[in-house]
Image (tube, grey):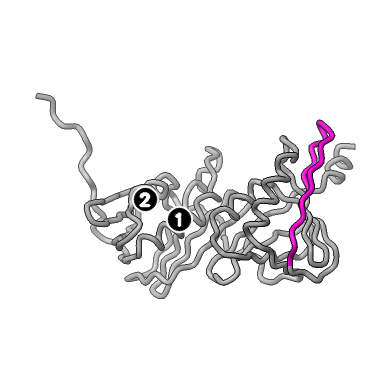
Amino acid sequence: MRQNSFPPFMEVEEGIDLTVDTADLKKAIRWTIFATTSEKSRFELDGLKWVLEKEGAKVIATDGRRLSCVGRDWKSSGEISCLIPTKTMHEAMNSLPDEGEVAIRVGERKMMMSCGDICMSSNLLVDNFPPYDRIIPKESLIQAVIPREELYAAVKRASNLASLETNMLTLELKKDALGIVGERQEVGGLGKDEVGIEYSGDDLKVFYNHRFLTDVLKVLDSEKIVLELWDATRPGVIKPVGDEDYLYVIMPMRPPEEDAEDEA
């Protein structure tokens, strides 16, 4: 008879404990995990950063071009910061039930989740996560309130004619309206859509990767979002109206004419 070579389940004997509603945990994962990266050269970003404190927690993800951060009122037995692999978080989102509570223990090198008959254990990544708090802008000069579903649909339509190489869309802010423009110069195609918004500032153009917009718009569930800007060159911030515990930082792209000047 062959000896069972399956490795034994290794529990986390010591660590920081917390109990979390499973639906809330899965929501926090869903709102952040899309911003991780699978690039092998940037393995330190292939995970979710958890910052646990006695009075609350944060879950953060970034791929270097955008950052997603959600705060939660999870109470833990102590304070710890760790980096949990993306694969582990995907497995938790797929395996845990939609209702109930999950007991979590985070140690120095491992973490464990227990919910009913389900028990998961995972190694932690070496935490070389960038200082995320420095990436998050502190103030904004420009704010636009935009219907989320309308913006999501308009971005998807305009993206059909965005450049296949850059995925770039142009967002044209003007009083009470937002224009979304996709242009594919290779075939001379141009697609433009417009959404009514709450905005009274000066006209402004910003350039974004359309995938970075649709990724966040499709996971949020608020009726409206706030787009906070400074100018066309600095990071923008998207926040759901009615939920101050979430923010999404997105880096703008360089305008096509600037790239053309550099090449010249």
Which residue appears at 55% of the width and 50% of the height?
Answer: 35
* Towards the viewer: 32 or 121: 32
Q: Is residue 222 magenta?
A: no
The residue range painted magenta reads 181-197
Most frequent secondary structure within the magenta stretch: strand
**143 over 4 or under it: above or below:** below
Which residue appears at 89% of the width and 42% of the height?
Answer: 261
Label 1 Cα neighbours within 10 Å, binned few <14 / some 14-19 / many ≥20: many
Any mark on residue 92, and which?
Answer: 2
- Asked whether, in this view, residue 201 is left or right of residue 116, the answer is right
Residue 210 placed where, x, y %? 68, 47
Quadrant in which the N terminus is drawn: top left
Q: Residue furthest bottom?
A: 55
* Towards the viewer: 44 or 256: 256
Say if mark 2 contacts mark 1, CB within 8 Å: yes
Q: Is residue 186 magenta?
A: yes
Label 2 Cα neighbours within 10 Å, binned few <14 / some 14-19 / many ≥20: some
- Mark 2 element type: helix
Residue 36 placed where, x, y %? 53, 48
Residue 60 placed where, x, y %? 51, 58
Quadrant in which the C terminus is drawn: top right
Question: Tag 2: residue type?
Answer: Ala
Image quadrant assignment for residue 139: bottom right
Which residue appears at 34% of the width and 65% of the height?
Answer: 20
- Asked whether, in this view, residue 22 is left or right of residue 116, the answer is right
**163 over 229 or under it: above or below:** above
* Towards the viewer: 72 or 54: 72
Question: Tag 1: residue type?
Answer: Ile
* Towards the viewer: 215 or 134: 215
Q: Which residue is mark 1?
A: 29
